[in-house]
Image: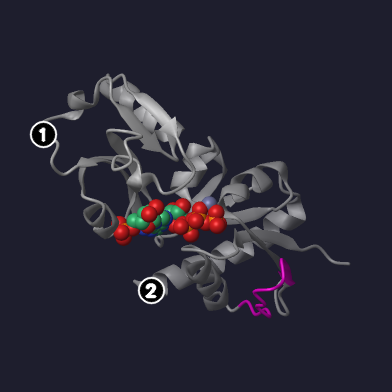
Amino acid sequence: MSCMLRLAIQKSGRLSEDSLNLIRECGISFVNSSLKLKTESTNFPLEILYLRDDDIPGYVADGVADIGIVGENVLVEEGKQSLTVEKLGFSRCRLSLAVPKTMEYDSIQDLNGKNIATSYPNLLQAYLQEQGVQANIHTISGSVEIAPSIGLAEAICDIVSSGSTLISNGLKEVERVFKSEAALIANEDLSEEKREILDKLLFRVHAVQRARK
Ligand code: PRT
Ligand code: ZN
C-alpha cells in the first residue's frame, strides 16, 4: 500500500468543524462518519483520526499520528509547542484569570496567597512566576467557573471567548494569561515520503488561507 499521512483532529468539540472545513477547502474529500474513529481520503494520501483534543499532542509526539490540529492552549500546557508547524487562525480564545465581580481587585498582587482553580496549571504557574505572585493552584478538569461560588477557590483561570460564561457566573476577567488559536502540529521525525505529502498539504492550506483574506 502506498504511503499515507495520518492527521489527528478533535472528534467532537469546538475545533472539529473548522478543522474539517479546512481539509475540505483544501480539496481533500472523505466520507465523514461521526461513528467512525478513522477515515481515509478518496483523493489525497491522508487518513483522519478522530480523537479527544487533549490526546492529540501526545499522539503526534509519539508518531501514532503524523500531524494534528489542536488549540495552542492545550499544546503549550502539555509542553509540546515545539511540534508547531503553523497557526491556523480559528478557535481563537484566551486563557484568563477571573475573580468574583464583588472582589476588590487592583493588580495581580491581590492574588498572592489565594486559591486559584484551573485546568491549565502549567500555563498558570508560568504566568504567576513571571509576575512574582505566589498562589495555590487547584487543578480541576471541568466546571472551573463555579469554583468560587462553591468555596473551592477565590479566583479561576479558564478559557474565555465571548466572556458570557464569566458574567453568568458572577465573575470578572482581570488578567489575560495566554492567547490561543488552532495550530497545525507535526511529528518531528517524519519519513521523507510523509514530509512530501505534508508539503503538498501545506501548499493547499496556504492557498486556502490566502483566498480567505
Ligand atoms: O472532548 P474534548 O476533550 O475533545 O473537548 P474539550 O471539551 O476539552 O474542548 P472544547 O471542544 O470545549 O474546546 C476545544 C478548544 O477550542 C479549546 O482547547 C480552545 O483551544 C478552543 N476554544 C475556543 C474554546 C473556547 N473557544 C471556549 N469558549 N474552548 C473552550 N471554551 C469554553 C470555556 O472553557 C468556557 O467554559 O467556553 C466557555 C467560555 O466561553 P464564552 O464564550 O462564554 O467566554
Ligand atoms: Zn479536551
Please name which of the two marks, 1 or 2, marks the residue nearer to the observer. 1
**Chief secondary structure of the magenta portion:** loop
* Residue reaching furthest to the right: 1
Residue 58 is covered by the magenta coloring? no
- For label 1, being within 8 Å of ligand 1 is answered no
Range drawn in magenta: 28-39
* Front one among 21 and 102: 102
- For label 2, being within 8 Å of ligand 1 is answered no
The quadrant of the rendering that contains the N terminus is: bottom right
109 left or right of 184 in image: left
- Indicate the quadrant where residue 2 lies: bottom right
In the rendered image, residue 184, in percent from the top left (x then y), is placed at 53, 55
- Work out whether mark 1 precedes mark 2 in sequence or the reverse, and give the earlier one: 1
**Kind of residue at badge 2:** Arg
In the rendered image, residue 119, in percent from the top left (x then y), is placed at 45, 40
In the rendered image, residue 30, in percent from the top left (x then y), is placed at 67, 78
* Residue hosting label 2: 212
Q: Residue at x 34, y 71 (%)?
A: 213
Picture disc at residue 104? 1
Residue 33 is covered by the magenta coloring? yes
Q: Residue at x 51, y 44 (%)?
A: 75
Q: Does 93 appear above or below 61?
A: below
